[in-house]
Amino acid sequence: MSFPWANHYQPTNPLMKWMDEKLPLPRFVYNAIGAGYPVPRNLNYWWNFGVLAGFCLMIQIVTGIILAMHYAPNALVAFDSTEHIMRDVNWGWMMRYAHANGASAFFVVVYTHIFRGFLFSSYKAPREMIWLLGVVIFLLMMATAFMGYVLPWGQMSFWGAKVITGLFGAIPLVGEPLQVWLLGGFAPDNAALNRFFSLHFLLPFVILGVVILHIWALHIPGSSNPTGVEVKQESDTVPFHPYYTAKDGFGLAAFLVIYTAFVFFMPNALGHPDNYIPANPLSTPAHIVPEWYFWPFYAILRAFTFDFFFVPAKLLGVLAMFAAILVWFFLPWLDTSPVRSARYRPLLRKFIWFGFVPCMAALFYLGGAPAEEPYVMFSQLAAAYYFAHFLIILPIVSMIEKTKPLPNSITDAVLAKNGEAAAE
Amino acid sequence: MVRLIGILVGIFFSGWLLVSLAVGFFTWASEPKVETAEHVFHEHPKALHLASDGPFGHFDLQQVQRGYKVYKEVCSACHSLRHVAFRDLEQLGYTEAQVKAEAATWMVPGIDPVTGEDTMRAALPTDYFPKPYPNDVAARAANNNAIPPDLSLMAKARHNGDAYVYSLLTGYQEQPAELLEEFPEAKTPDGLHYNPYFPNLNLAMAQPLMDGQVDFDDGSPNDLDSMSQDLAAFLVWTAEPTLAKRHATGWPVVLFLLIATVLAYLAYRNVWRNEKH
Ligand code: HEM
């Protein structure tokens, strides 16, 4: 698990000694996020985002439980109970805005965390399992966020639910019965709202369980680092506490400034005004859009406009949308380069910054734009690059690229950066 | 094997997207672009500045009170305000007694305490603002088949909602001659009214508010423009009565966190002072 030079837990206080014999929980914490866990000394701010994601999960669970105390999952009163929280419940408005903007913050953080994985190939051996569990977490997060957005039962809740569950209707033969079964009816109604509430309450705890596995898996090889060179010696690491607790503390405080600025000063900036109109099955909104964090995948879904022989365009779009995330599961095996960090992979680095990043920016924008030309053409271009990037460019570049020489060790890299000759 | 399948899947998806792109481009380039009247003549809301704007925003209670008066005397004939209760008016600076008296000027549905029959009774502070129509059918019948929407959340339920309401109220005009020339089929149908701020340009509500229609006790200006601003301010309040409290709470929180960030940064530098990284 840990490196041989890790500090050992030695309680001196008699109470802690007693505790260590009966239930070694303090020892566990010490070894997991305390002075007993050696971490590469050269982690940069990209490595802050895992802890931030964990904090977001906590925000969501705490605010969510409080909201659930006042919310009523019934199609007749769901909208009004949300307004009741906003108006009559003490600090209810703060809980609701903290939860809604917390979801957005969570996705910002997790997208950054995932992007760190692309930049430093964190998905590569020996960290495949951390990555695979991460993708599972991301899928669970998407399901949770989708169902949560349905709960206030506004226009976008209703029509979003209708469109997204309608995607299952694209599956041949079983599609329509499946959709009816998922919704408990032909359109979203009380049955759907109730089960979405139940699952929306459950899934964050499932996520919590998978996060524990994710961190467990992380502690086996330990964190990677910006050079991608594995830890070799004691001088490559520092104990997690106090070094990274201090750095994560700073990152957390900075994150909270931005997050609370949204909660208190622009809480509706990321939401859609139509969701302040009660759900109305008889009136379709002009543009049905999901929440912003689904836009890249929504853009891919809508980019398929032509049937492929007997496969209808809609089904292709659905398959592509799921495939867009499922490809992440295969990255550890699609990328064969012996080098991890894009710092030493000049060609891949160019493709990431000048291909993938603009492509994602475009997909984010286009998913929220109306399904009209010229937007659709741009989403076709961006989506084509998206699949090409992971499935064609990455495998080929990783095979043919001439990588830059790696430093001998993390220590060497750090000394070189600080303008000193390598010690050994 | 994974890579081979991956590359094939990639070629399939990307390839088909590029084919769709080519076909889409061809149709887009070859088909004549059809403009619609909405595209050309729809206007974005006019600029509106209210005391509630921005991170320091709070309510101008005098203005919100005037807006309430406009709502009461004009809009309440057709629009409900179902998320607002009379007791909420205390937040506008009225005393408990004033709120009680104000509530009593409204009639709400009730039950006769002796016979149990449906009657109307004077409202109490705990009551919510009453609906002007007993049901949607009645609302449609009275309004050229359109339902006047509830106004409680209107300021949040439209993009830039307060400016939108203000623009809508002041935006009624004759249908421009160029519009009729370019799009003869877009002539405002009978019973609808032209307003360039409304998404499809024609709505079922006739201009509800006119210059001088409401009088204010303190002699505040009662031209259409001023009253429309007052009304927008009122609807910002009905949409989010907690807005001022939110801003007032936000500042200490954000300032505290800013200081915490600086301290955390200094602590971080201090912890790392002897460690190269
Ligand atoms: C609830 C969501 C998540 C939480 C709480 C979480 C938590 C963490 C934490 C605390 C770390 C160690 C600190 C760091 O490297 O930033 C970490 C590392 C990692 N996470 Fe996550 N994570 C989440 C989601 C994800 C997702 C969605 C992915 C990928 C799809 C992912 C992939 C990884 C990988 C590959 C590492 C190892 C990075 C390295 O050492 O280079 N995580 N995660």
Image (cartoon, coloured by chain):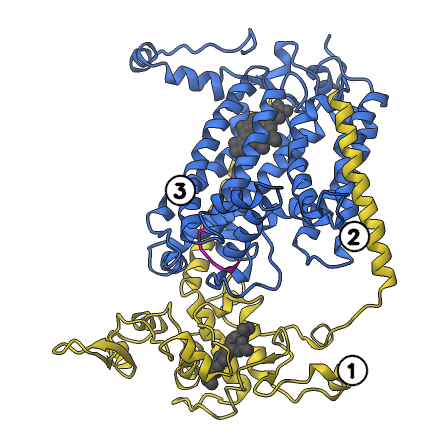
Chain colours: A blue, B yellow
Residue in front for this viewpoint, A165 or A383: A165
Q: Residue A181 versus residue A152: which sits nearer the camera?
A: A181
* Mark-to-mark CA distance, 1 and 3: 54 Å
Percent coordinates x, y for residue B18 in the rendering: 82, 45
Q: Label 2 marks which chain's residue?
A: A
Residue at horizontal 50%, vertical 69%?
B155
Instruction: Name above or below for residue A401 compared with residue A295.
Output: above
- Check disc 2 and report the residue beneath it: A377
Q: Quadrant of residue A369?
A: bottom right
User: x, y percentage for residue A264?
Assistant: 48, 55
Magenta region, residue range = A151-155
Please say if the residues under marks 3 and 2 sit with CB atoms less than 8 Å apart. no
User: Mark 3 or 2 closer to N-term?
Assistant: 3
Q: Which residue is mark 3?
A: A198
Residue A377, above or below A248: below
Residue type at the position of mark 1: Glu
Q: Residue at x 65, y 35 (%)?
A: A325
Q: Quadrant of the N terminus of chain A?
A: top right
- The quarter in which the C terminus of chain A is drawn is top right
Q: Which mark is residue B107?
A: none
Q: Secondary structure at mark 2?
A: helix
Q: Secondary structure at mark 3?
A: helix
Type of the residue with mark 2: Met
Question: Residue B78 is drawn in which quadrant?
Answer: bottom left
Residue identifier under label 1: B182
- A120 vs B23, left or right, is left
Q: Residue furthest left?
A: B114
Q: Nearer the viewer, residue A75 or A186?
A: A186
Q: Nearer the viewer, residue B16 or A367?
A: B16
